[in-house]
C-alpha cells in the first residue's frame, strides 16, 4: 500500500468535520458477500433466465416461487459479519467525523456495525413487508421456509429491496443527495461507479476533498484529490491503527 497516499488520507480525515461515505459492493465482499457481476458474483453461473429478469418486479409478481428460490440461494448471507470498513465508518460517526453512510448494498452490515445515519439506496434484506396489509417481517421469516413466505393475513411477503423495474425510494435519495451536498469530504469506496442513478450522486458534491478507494480504477479518479486502488477494508484497518479519529476506545 502506498504510504504517502495513506498518510494523505489520514490528514484529510483529521482535518474534516463533515465526512460522507458512499459505498458499493466492494465494501461487503470482505465479509464474504459476493458482488454481482464478477466471475464468482451473484449473477454468475447458470440460471434458467437472466438474473436481471429473475430479480425484477414483474417476475416477482408473476413467479414468486422461482424468485424466492434464486433470492435465498444467491442473495442472502445471514452469517456475514461487519468487516474493518463497516467498523471504521461506525467509529467515525461516533467520533463526530462522519455524518452519513450511503450504500448500494442490501445486507444491513453498516447497521450491524453500529452506524445509525445510513441511506440504503437499494433497501435491506432484513426488512420485509406483507404486500396486502403491510405487516413487517424480519429476515428469519424468509429463511424459515422454502415456500413463498406469507403473512398471517395470507398476503405474500416482499423483501424491502429495490428490484429491477422499481424506482429508488424518493426520501432515501433526497437524504443522500442532501448529505453529499453538505459534506466537506466525500469518500467513495468499493464501487466502480457504473450503476446509475447512484453513480451520479458524485455530481452533487461541493466540498473540499474527494477521495476514491476501489480495487480498480474508476472514471472519476481524475476528479479526485486522492485515489487509492486498494481493498477498502485494509485501508480503513490501517487508518484505525493510526488512530486518525482520536475517538475513545470502544
Image (cartoon, helix red, strand yellow):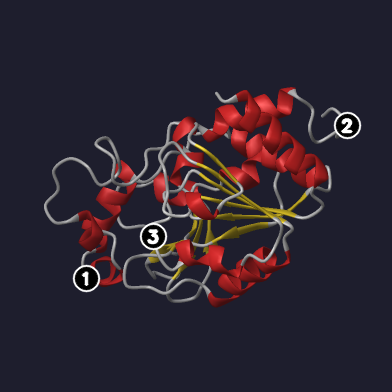
Where disc 3 sits, the SS reads loop
Q: Nearer the viewer, mark 1 or mark 2?
A: 2
Depth check: give the residue in front, 44 or 235.
235
Which residue is under mark 3?
Answer: 195
Of the image marks 3 and 1, the number of the one nearer the N terminus: 1
Could one spot residue 152 in this view of the protein? no
> Which residue is at 32% across, 50% downward?
71
Q: Quadrant of residue 50?
A: bottom left
Q: What x and y, as percent, mark residue 118?
A: 64, 56
Residue 204 can be seen in this image: yes
Residue 190, image x, y percentages: 48, 43
Question: Badge 2: few (under 14), some or many (20 or more) residues near its Cα, within 10 Å?
Answer: few
Which structural element holds mark 1?
A: helix
Residue on which the image places disc 2: 248
Contact flag, marks 1 and 2 (Cβ < 8 Å): no
- Front residue of 242/26: it is 242
Mark with earlier residue (3, 2)? 3
* Residue drawn at (24%, 36%) of the image: 39
Mark 3, Cα crowd under 10 Å, few <14 / some 14-19 / many 20+, is: few
Horizontal relation, residue 202 to residue 151: left or right: right
Separation (CA) of disc 1 from disc 2: 52 Å
Q: CA distance from mark 3 to mark 2?
A: 37 Å
Within 10 Å of disc 1 (Cα), the crowding (few <14, some 14-19, many 20+) is few
Residue at (48%, 46%) from the top-left corner?
A: 140
**Residue hosting label 1:** 62
Amino acid at each position: 500500500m502506498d504510504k504517502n497516499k495513506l498518510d494523505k488520507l489520514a490528514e484529510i480525515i483529521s482535518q474534516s468535520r463533515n465526512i460522507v461515505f458512499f459505498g458499493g459492493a466492494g465494501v461487503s465482499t470482505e465479509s464474504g458477500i459476493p458482488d454481482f457481476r464478477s466471475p464468482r458474483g451473484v449473477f454468475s453461473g447458470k440460471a434458467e433466465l437472466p438474473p436481471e429478469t429473475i430479480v425484477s418486479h414483474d417476475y416477482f409478481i408473476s413467479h414468486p416461487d422461482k424468485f424466492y428460490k434464486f433470492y435465498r440461494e444467491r442473495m442472502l448471507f445471514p452469517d456475514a459479519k461487519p468487516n474493518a470498513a463497516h467498523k471504521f465508518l461506525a467509529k467515525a460517526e461516533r467520533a463526530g467525523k462522519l455524518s452519513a453512510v450511503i450504500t448500494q448494498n442490501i445486507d444491513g452490515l453498516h447497521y450491524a456495525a453500529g452506524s445509525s445515519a445510513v441511506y440504503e439506496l437499494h433497501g435491506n434484506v432484513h426488512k420485509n413487508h406483507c404486500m396486502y396489509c403491510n405487516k413487517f417481517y424480519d429476515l428469519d421469516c424468509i429463511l424459515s421456509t422454502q415456500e413463498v413466505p406469507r403473512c398471517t393475513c395470507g398476503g405474500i411477503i416482499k423483501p424491502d429491496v429495490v428490484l429491477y423495474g422499481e424506482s429508488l425510494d424518493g426520501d432515501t435519495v433526497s437524504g443522500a443527495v442532501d448529505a453529499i451536498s453538505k459534506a466537506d469530504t466525500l469518500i467513495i469506496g468499493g464501487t466502480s461507479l457504473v450503476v446509475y442513478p447512484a453513480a451520479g450522486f458524485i455530481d452533487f458534491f461541493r466540498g473540499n476533498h474527494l477521495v476514491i478507494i476501489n480495487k480498480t480504477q474508476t472514471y472519476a479518479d481524475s476528479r479526485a484529490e486522492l485515489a487509492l486502488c486498494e481493498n477498502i477494508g485494509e485501508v480503513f484497518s490501517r487508518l484505525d491503527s493510526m488512530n486518525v479519529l482520536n475517538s475513545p476506545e470502544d
